[in-house]
Amino acid sequence: MRMTPDHRVYIAGHRGLVGSALLRSLQQRGYRHIITRTHAELDLTDAPAVNAFFATEQPGFVLLAAAKVGGILANHTYPADFLRENLLIQTNVIEASRRSGVQRLLFLGSSCIYPKLCPQPMREEYLLTGPLEPTNRPYALAKIAGVEMCWACNRQFGTRYLAAMPTNLYGPGDSFDLQNSHVLPALLRKADTARRNGDPTMTVWGSGTPRRELLHSDDLADACLFLLETDDAVFDSLLPTDAPPLINIGTGEDLSIRELAELAARVTGFPGDLVFDASKPDGTPRKLMDVSRLRALGWQPRIPLEEGVRAVYEAAKDQLAQFWATARTPSDSN
Ligand SMILES: NC(=O)c1ccc[n+]([C@@H]2O[C@H](COP(=O)([O-])OP(=O)(O)OC[C@H]3O[C@@H](n4cnc5c(N)ncnc54)[C@H](OP(=O)(O)O)[C@@H]3O)[C@@H](O)[C@H]2O)c1
């Protein structure tokens, strides 16, 4: 059964970057029965609490966007927490969904499930074809177990659970915290700080040559709802019995860190020069999703990168001004 505005829809993790975008999209489309719980109200690692919640609320559709998420440092410092909490969250939600007869579930993963040296662009078939990136291996393994769980439930119980793998995301509510931020917020904060300081240059870590793909969280949410709102025949074609029920979500286009830094400078109004510190690590040379499976269904992103980045910067300006005023940001670190 396809999802419609009359159905009861549960968003797990509705205050996160992804979950908040899903909430906005559902509200804009006129969904009348959106079910949410904060982490404090419902700890998804608590199986009895999750089962009781599903038994009471009886959602028909589930968007599983709750996860313990973090940067390299957090993944390195708390590997056991990343593995355990993500396994528990997804297992509890998937199992409670099965028990309570949820129609369709969308499990959000990440491109880190693909091998470290994955051919580019990364196709869904490349799952488990090579070793993972060691820095977030526990997190990636938990997510791979989630994909496997969706697939196993579909085969054993006839459920309709799909795993969506988004590329790097940006959007409203993204973190500008220097310890934990993604590449785009880090560059925006750096360029904003350099402009306010009147610095002649802004230093960017690495050579500037690695390429990254970026998708606005509102476009991701649109793709997720597009998938849950498709007809059964189309949705079921994404759930083969002989391959994981997996679909990449991205733009299919990437740009270099240099181009991204130039965009950050343009958007923040930083007039100075960019300096690339090639003594700092570059990370993976390229991370680009193959999105032909999603494209073939007729979906494509709507928000042009520069427009999306400008909107994110405008919304975060006060926060960035405050960071600058409290002088917590050295302008020469990523
Ligand atoms: N951001 C990206 O660039 C990106 C890219 C690709 C894929 N994804 C995927 O999208 C999903 C969501 O990511 P995100 O960026 O939206 O993360 P996020 O902003 O950190 O949000 C995660 C949400 O999950 C909630 N949560 C965590 N542990 C919980 C628990 N035990 N019980 C209940 N709620 C819990 C968090 O609540 P609290 O904050 O209150 O703990 C938060 O609302 C993840 O699976 C991630 O892999 C993200």
Image: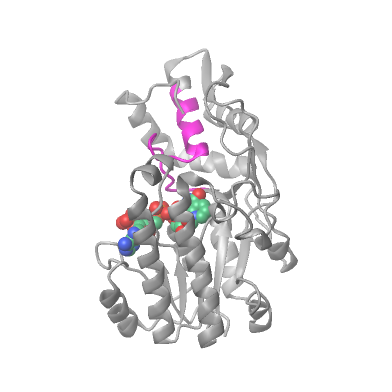
Q: Measured along the vertical axis of the image, is residue 16 above or below residue 293?
A: above
Where is residue 2 shown, x and y percent of the image? 58, 81
From the top left corner, tell me how far across and down residue 99 is, in percent. Answer: 39, 85
Counting from the top left corner in percent of width and height, residue 172 is at 46, 48
Check the image and report above or below for 44 versus 287.
below
Residue placed most toward the observer, 215 or 271: 215
Asked where in the image residue 76 lies, by quadrant, the reply is top left
| Side of 230 relative to 51 (left or right) | right
Q: Is residue 56 above or below residue 22?
A: below
Residue shown at 44%/54% (left/top)?
Answer: 139
Q: Can you name the residue that lies furthest to the top here?
A: 200
Range of the magenta residues? 170-193
Can the viewer see residue 25 in this picture? Answer: no
Q: Residue at x 27, y 68 (%)?
A: 42
Query: Looking at the image, can residue 8 be seen?
Result: yes
In the image, taking residue 125 as reference, residue 323 lies left or right, namely left
Residue shown at the point (55%, 75%) measured from the top left: 151
User: Which image quarter has ligand 1?
Assistant: bottom left
Quadrant into which the N terminus falls: bottom right
Residue 121: percent from left, percent from top: 70, 50
**Does the segment drawn in magenta span residue 273?**
no
Q: Nearer the viewer, residue 286 or 293?
A: 286
Residue drawn at x 47%, y 51% as measured from the top left:
137
Q: Is residue 168 left or right of residue 331?
A: right
